[in-house]
Amino acid sequence: MEYSVGQVGRVIVARGFEGEDVYQQIEGIARKENIACAAVMVVGGLRSAKVVVGPKDPHGPIKPLFREFNDAREIAGVGTLFNDSAGPKLHMHGAIGRGDEVIAGCPRGGATVFCVLEVIIIEIVGVDARRQKDPELGLDLLRVLAVAAK
C-alpha cells in the first residue's frame, strides 16, 4: 500500500442549492481555492443522478453498472478530491435513499442538488498524491507519489 503523512489545512463549509451540479460546484471550489488534496463529506438531498453501483462484470473489462433516479432523495456521502491532469477531481460514494429504497454507490452523471446539500471540504497538505491513468485498467486512479519512509 502506498501512503504518505500530511496535515489538515483549511476547512471549507459550503451549501449547495436546488439544481446545482454537485461535482461542478465542489470541484469549482477546489479549483478556486487551489486545493489539490482533500476529504469531502456531504449530507442533504439529490434531485437526480446516475449512480455507479458496481462493475457490469467483475471478471471482465471494467464497465460501470448504473442506476438512475430523478425523484429527489437523501444522501450521506464521503469522498476525496485529488488533482488529475485537468485539475481537481471529486470521487464520492454515498448511501442515497427515498422511502425504503436505498442505492449505495458513486453518484455522478449529472448529480444535482435537491433543496440543500451541506458540504465539508477538509484540505490535506504536505501530501503528493494525484489521480493518474492506470495503463492496465484505463482508469484515473489515485497514486501516492511521495511515499512515507518504511
Image: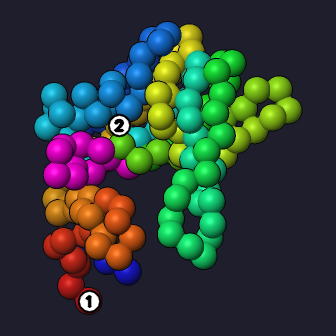
Residue 86 x, y percent position in the rendering: 17, 45
- From the viewer's perspective, is residue 4 above or below residue 119? below
Decide if residue 6 is in sight here.
no
Q: Write down the quadrant of residue 49 in the picture.
A: top right
Q: Is residue 86 magenta?
A: yes
- Identify which residue is drawn at 63% across, 66% down: 57
Residue 89 x, y percent position in the rendering: 30, 44
- Identify which residue is drawn at 48% across, 37% down: 108
The kind of residue tagged 1 is Lys
Image colouring: rainbow
Screen quadrant of the N terminus: bottom left
- Identify which residue is drawn at 27% across, 59% down: 131
Q: Is residue 35 magenta?
A: no
Decide if residue 78 is in sight here.
yes
The residue that disc 1 covers is 150
Screen quadrant of the C terminus: bottom left
Residue interval drawn in magenta: 80-89
Please state which of residues 70 and 146 is positioned toward the viewer in this rendering: 70
The residue that disc 2 covers is 121
Decide if residue 105 is on the left or right side of residue 14: right
Q: Earlier in the sequence, mark 2 or mark 1?
A: 2
Q: Write down the quadrant of residue 75 in the picture.
A: top right
- From the viewer's perspective, is residue 4 above or below residue 31? below
- From the viewer's perspective, is residue 88 above or below residue 42? below
